[in-house]
Amino acid sequence: MDFLEGLNPQQKAAVEHVEGPLLLLAGAGSGKTRVITHRIAHLVEAHHVPGPCILAVTFTNKAADEMRQRVHSLLGGDLGRSSPMVSTFHSFCVRLLRRDGANLAQIRPNFTKNFTIYDDDDQVSLLKSIYKALGLDEKFMPYRACCSWISHNKSHKLSSQDVYSSAKDHKGSRLAVIYDRYEQRLRQANALDFDDLLLEPVRLLQHDQDLREQYNRRFEFVMIDEYQDTNRTQYDLIRLLSDAHKNIAVVGDEDQSIYGWRGADIRNILDFEHDFPNASVIRLEQNYRSTKNILEAASALVANNKERKGKWLWTESAAGSRIGVYEAVDAENEALFIADTIENLLAMDRGQRVAVLYRTNFQSRQIEEALRRYGRKYIVVGGFSFYQRAEIKDILSYLKVLVSPEDSISLLRIVNNPARGIGKTTTDEIEQFALENQMSMWSAIGRMLDEGAFPPRAEAAVQAFRNLIDELSAEVNKWTIDETLRQILDRSGYRRMLQAVETPESESRLGNLEELLNAAVDAAERGEGVTEFLDHAALVADSDNLDERAEVSLLTMHNAKGLEFPYVFIAGLEEGLFPHTRSIESGEGMEEERRLCYVGMTRAEKRLILTYAKFRRKFGGSPPERCIPSRFLKEVPAALKETLGRGMDVTQVDLYSEQHAVRETVKKNLYTGQTVNSVENINQFFTERGIAPVKLPAAPLPKPQQAVAVARPPQVRKKPFGAGSMIRHPKYGRGQILKREGDGDDAKLTVSFPGYGLKKLIEKYAGIKEE
DNA sequence: AAGAAGTGGCTTTTT
DNA sequence: GCCACTTCTT
């Protein structure tokens, strides 16, 4: 196959580039992914480079998956072991440490390849514990702020000693102490935070010459996607990996650099030619995505930035509609306008995809409410992810403790959850003891039991907890992941605790745990071990579960990077919201906001509509505040804009009185792993309230559904359900069994639920009954 | 020790 | 308006 066919001259040049550094400046919609995948295929076929010698790195799992798939289909089918390595920075680094990280123990105390990963919730818990030991509270500095302060220092290679010696005041040196303790405690728990995941491979490769040479020998060709968003650590890693061959190709667009606040350094891309002498530079400036008007509007906007390499995108496509601008009275009105206009657009142009983009996640709520009023299906990308749910984190914490009992943060989370009589006093004592003796909480528990340090009642409770963990640990290696999770759920009493309270809330939690079990079964089938399962849970991002098929997607502009939609709305273009107050002060921050706007605008293929509100409430109860239209609106040339008015007026339902109920429903539906807001749901929602939906969708109407049963039926031993039979699920309602696999306790059912799609359920745990 | 009920304090973006 | 944290009650 000829991988050069159908490419424009610049794309062709990039694909044909073989040796030496390459900087590919790829504008929005210029066929970047196509070029990367074709280049990989070309290297393999035309230059006979073995697949595994090529490393391609992206930022999100989603981008990696897509790239992998496209490479595979270009090269024809299953490549097996000869496949190029396509990975995200973080999973590449985790794999490196799990496989070849043993020698890191030489430079990181207590490190083993069994390390755990601390996400930001874990970081906050750790900081709480440190604050407590230092007698501080959140007034000193909010945990989250402290977290990002530490992260900022780490990614800029400033140690706690560096920070301490440059501290200007008492607060500065206090912070340095917190930072220092934080680092100590991570090491003690054999845990790595997200910064460490990148930093430690760099330190290891610098430290271990053999390993560095081994990796250099292997990866002859290295490619980095979204280079504008790399931070200094990632830059170091890239340099180390490409040191021997210097066959480093980076792809990026300085106009789309939007992660400066997370440590991304735009200088990496601006200075590439300086850092890698003899680099070839190729610009991809032809845009294949958007209409001329959209492209010109976005280009004119971003031209207001100074930190650019400068390029001007062009397109052969038609001018298209002008950019719509709508001024709403308030946020409710804005949301209704968007929902209303979506109805009109989709009525004219059926089956198309629409995105509503916004700056901050909380903006989604009102838009959701408006979409529900129209019975329109939508998905929300981001916000809370499945793996952030409390019950999921609880059970995974059990798993983490089994793998690595030194992980005190996970231990702290589960020690009295479900409640087993180890209260605050006892926990504080254990923590105190661990701190004083420089040991983990798990070791402290052992020692304190040996020394008889607990009062009788607490002793019994702690002893029972220790036995539970010991018993589970003894057998964990014999079980598959799903079996381990089941044992945890049963023996810890966690399932019983949820079953005891028969509220919709606990039902929903049980449902989420069921999803987790399904995921575990799938992982076990793929042959994954517990560690891989946990790594996956730590590294999946919210945007990774984006469902391309949804008609309407709601997401932040950050999450929209790399995606495209025929119709795009950008909501909330107001000074203070977008650009955000926190960025307005600094020139750099403003430029990044502008780039973010550029990213949002260039997602649109056919039509782009910008909206803002004259008044907006800061929060629910507070009075609406006057808003100034965003400066970005003015930066779009007048000739490219048109002012839009409201279409139909929608005032049949009192939205305020619905808000609470809607939110509850939204919450429940968000965490099923599948966030599609089904037609059945919406109908049910309105029927329950005796309100007719504004407009019924043309799609086949479902039979009206009864309210979901709340009470869980007593678990009687029942005859197994076979394929074809109808069942009722506590959360998904009526469904038909399509497939049955396995038998007895392990029986797995594939069930089709109208409105929810296919679900894999484990019969024993699903709580289903005959319909 | 564990739940219920009340109150302060703050909201950017996320691998 | 929401969440995390505190105080109150048993």
Image (spheres, coloured by chain):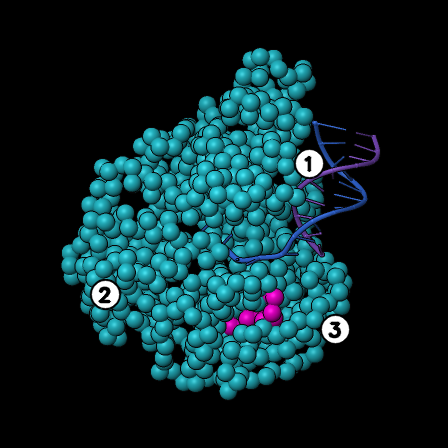
Chain colours: A cyan, B blue, C purple
In this view, A496 is above or below A572: above
Contact (CB < 8 A) between labels 3 and 2? no
Q: Which residue is drawn at 55% across and 71% down?
A: A570
Taking depth in this image into account, of A654 and A497 the one nearest to the observer is A654
Q: Which residue is drawn at 25% across and 72% down?
A: A10
Q: Which residue lies furthest to the front in this view?
A: A168
Give the residue type at disc 1: Ala
Give the residue type at disc 2: Ser
Give the residue type at disc 3: Gln
Q: Which of marks 1 and 3 is nearer the N terminus?
A: 1
Q: Nearer the observer, disc 1 or disc 3?
A: 3
Per the image, the residue denoted by label 3 is: A652
- Give the class, few, some or many, for how many residues have Cα within 10 Å of label 1's Cα (few <14, many ≥20): few
- Give the class, few, some or many, for how many residues have Cα within 10 Å of label 3's Cα (few <14, many ≥20): few
Per the image, the residue denoted by label 1 is: A500
Q: Earlier in the sequence, mark 2 or mark 1?
A: 2
